[in-house]
Structure formats: C-alpha cells, structure tokens
Image (cartoon, rainbow, N blue to C red):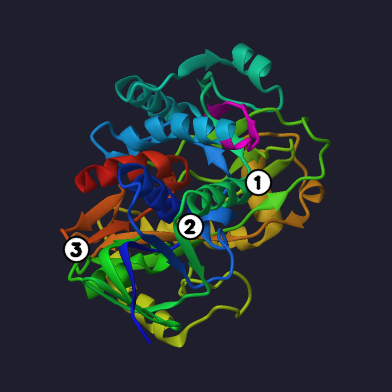
C-alpha cells in the first residue's frame, strides 16, 4: 500500500489544532494538510468541555504569551463567530472581592489590564449592583466589558467545518501511535508528513518527547467540575469571578452565563491521576496513575505553590453542596437545590516544570524545522487559539 503524504500533519483536532490547520491553509493555499485525532468527532475533550468564556486578557503578566494572545484571540474569535454565524453572548464579567485583603490583588488585575491593552474598570459596590445585581463585593469590584461567552463545542465544530471546506483532510478515528520527523503512524497506517504540528492536548507532552522536546516537563491533570442552575434564563446577567490566587494558574470557582442564558458554577481544579478520568473509574490507566504519582513528590515539595492547601481546598469540591457554597460567597442568593444538573467535566493538561518544581503559567511553544509543539495549551487557550496559530505560524511564511 502506498504511503499517503501531506505537507503538514496536525496531531489533535481540538480548537488549537484546527486553528493551526486553518492558519497554515491561509499561508499555504496549495499545501496538503491533514488533521489526525483518535476520536470519531471533534471537541470531545478540553475544546468541548470548557466554560466557553471568551477571556479578555487582564489576568496575565504583560510579558507572557497568554497576555498577548488572549487579548488578540478574543477579537479574532468574535470575528470568526460573526463570519460563521455562531452565537456569542456579550455578557461582560465582574471580579469581586470577599474581604479587604483582596483589594490590592484586584487593583493588580486592573494594572495588568492597562499594561496588556485590555479595557477594565474598577467599580464601586453601587456600580456593581447596576452591572450584576446578584453579585456582592467588599468595597470595589472589577468590570471587564470585553469578556463574553459562546458554546465551545459549536465553535470547535464550526472551525472544523471551515478547515474541511477549504481543503484540509480531517482524519478522525486515527490514533497516533508514533510520531517522528516527517512520519506519523496511526492505527490506519503510516503517513509521510513534511512538518508535524503537535496539538495533542492531554498527550502533547508524550508526542513532543518523541521529538526530543518537553523532557523538562511532566503532565499533571486537574479535573474541572460544573453544575448548571435551574434559574430562568437571564436571571444572572454577567460572569462573576473571585479574585484568583496568583500563586496558581487557576481562577477559582466562579459563575458563568451560558450563551443561552443559563447560570453555571465551576470549574474546580481537582488533582487527579489519569488524563481521561472524566467520571468514576472510566478512563483510568494504571501506567498513567503510577507515572503521575511518581511526579507528585516534586510537586508537593514546591516552594512556588501551596500544594497541600490546594489539595485541601479542591478535594471537598467533589461534593456538590460544598462547591455551591464556594459560589455563594460571590452570589449570596444561590441555593444548593438550584444547581443539581451536572455539566460535562473537563480535564486541564497542566505542565509542571520538573527542575524548578513549578506549575507552568504560560503557553509553551517548542520545535524546529521538522516539527512544532504547542504545550500547556490550557485556559485561556480556547479564547487564544486563532491568535496562537497566527503567532506560531509566522515561522511557516
């Protein structure tokens, strides 16, 4: 059987991989492009299991890729949705404080927003009542007008349709078992690839290590749980977030509004020991469990994070009533009985810098003339995907 050849082969048909295929097509209209994914549909992992929030970009240190690419990606994703007739809800976001000690951190978010070219405004309690009557804060809050929301799975499907429509080949059900320079091996056979683009999400580190990249990182998965409310659509008007702990790359439990107006609580950041353990014992891999357990001594001894505090805080959130109580600090009118519908859990593909015992806070891009690897493509990667592709693909010009 002859070997099928492509100029570019993308591993992973999540939103980042599809964005890369889309941008490569724009730069090289005549290139042969294939996107491989082990699943039979797109968006079955992080791309279809996140909150769908279009982040504005004020959380991140100005010298990071996240700062630049979230700001630009927000606008690019809005434009894409307008072009492809995908619904977006312009909710905006309020970040609220729970005590006076958080005010300086809130002011720091405002400062970062200014440095990142992102519009934010410090508002009073009275102004907060106008923006989101259900939210409560101490002294002041932060208003982000450019935060929005869309259905993450619908956006991912629309991008997949565009990529296929414009000539790329989507090879679903193709599990990549081996990848090397200029070759990808799947359960359907061997493919000759001019340039391999690794956007494998939860398995991006494993693919990268086959090319000699990512040996300084280890993958630590964290589970995000969600609960939907039975409130009438529109009762909650804005996303409501807490002030995050800047020592960790997580934003804390928050309330978001879906594109159809429903209220949703989540996500958590619960440490787990297998990359696709979405529920119960499903998706558990004994080898992965042993590998991840082997990493934890380095994580637990990190001087950069309060790891034991994180674990103590997160594990109780498996209990619905406890998770809802966390959100009640932001919106006091919440009741546990109002949030009984489970959302699809997601798993964050978080990298740990093994040498420095530190969770990686930024996107990581590695590669050479034969391969490109997008690592730690965690939140806000969904917002940033189109801008990330434009940034990374500059080298393909």
Q: Distance of mark 3 from mark 2, alpha carbons?
A: 21 Å
Q: Nearer the viewer, residue 85 or 293?
A: 85
Residue at 50% across / 56% down in the picture? 269
358 shown above or below 242: below
In the rendered structure, which disc, 3 or 2, sits on the residue that comes first in sequence? 2
208 shown above or below 283: above
Mark 3–mark 1 contact, CB under 8 Å? no
Residue 363 placed where, x, y %? 31, 49
Mark 3–mark 2 contact, CB under 8 Å? no
Category of crowding for the residue at label 1, using alpha-carbon neighbours closer than 10 angstroms: few (below 14), some (14–19), many (at least 20): many
Q: Is residue 48 left or right of residue 220?
A: right
Q: Nearer the viewer, residue 389 or 110?
A: 389
Mark 1 highlights which residue? Answer: 265
In the rendered structure, which disc, 3 or 1, sits on the residue that comes first in sequence? 1
User: Viewer-nearest of labels 1 and 2?
Assistant: 2
Q: Quadrant of the N terminus?
A: bottom left
Label 2: element kind? loop
Label 3: element kind? loop
Residue at 22% across / 65% down in the picture? 214
Mark 3 highlights which residue? Answer: 370
Span of residues in magenta: 84-98
Mark 2 highlights which residue? Answer: 14
Residue 291 placed where, x, y %? 35, 80
């Amino acid at each position: 059987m002859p070997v099928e050849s492509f100029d570019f082969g993308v591993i992973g048909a999540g939103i980042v991989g599809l964005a890369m295929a889309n941008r490569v097509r724009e730069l090289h209209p005549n290139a042969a492009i294939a996107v491989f994914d082990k699943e039979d549909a797109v968006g079955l992992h992080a791309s279809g299991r996140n909150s769908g929030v279009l982040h504005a970009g004020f959380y991140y240190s100005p010298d990071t890729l996240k700062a630049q690419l979230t700001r630009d990606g927000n606008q690019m994703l809005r434009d894409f949705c307008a072009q492809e007739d995908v619904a977006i809800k312009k909710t905006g976001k309020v970040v609220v404080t729970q005590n006076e000690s958080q005010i300086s951190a809130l002011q720091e978010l405002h400062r970062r927003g200014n440095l990142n070219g992102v519009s934010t405004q410090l508002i009073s309690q009275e102004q907060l009542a106008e923006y989101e009557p259900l939210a409560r804060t101490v002294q002041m809050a932060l208003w982000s007008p450019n935060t929005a929301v869309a259905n993450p799975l619908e956006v991912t499907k629309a991008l997949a349709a565009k990529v296929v429509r414009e000539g790329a080949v989507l090879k679903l059900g193709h599990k990549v078992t081996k990848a090397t320079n200029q070759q990808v091996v799947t359960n359907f056979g061997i493919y000759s690839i001019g340039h391999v683009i690794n956007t494998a999400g939860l398995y991006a580190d494993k693919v990268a290590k086959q090319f000699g990249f990512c040996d300084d990182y280890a993958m630590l998965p964290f589970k995000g749980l969600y609960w939907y409310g039975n409130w009438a659509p529109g009762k909650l008007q804005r996303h409501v977030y807490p002030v995050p702990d800047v020592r960790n790359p997580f934003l804390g439990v928050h309330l978001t509004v879906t594109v159809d107006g429903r209220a949703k609580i989540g996500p958590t950041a619960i440490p787990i020991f297998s990359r696709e353990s979405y529920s119960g014992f499903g998706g558990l891999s004994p080898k992965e469990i042993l590998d991840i357990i082997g990493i934890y001594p380095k994580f637990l001894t990190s001087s950069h994070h309060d790891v034991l505090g994180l674990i103590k805080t997160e594990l109780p959130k498996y209990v619905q009533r406890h998770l809802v109580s966390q959100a009640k600090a932001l919106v006091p009118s919440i009741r546990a009985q109002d949030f009984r519908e489970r959302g699809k859990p997601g798993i964050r593909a978080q990298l740990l810098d093994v040498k420095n015992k530190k969770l990686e806070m930024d996107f990581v891009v590695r590669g050479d003339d034969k391969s490109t690897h997008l690592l730690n493509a965690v939140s806000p990667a969904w917002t940033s995907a189109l801008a990330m592709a434009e940034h990374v693909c500059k080298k393909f010009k």
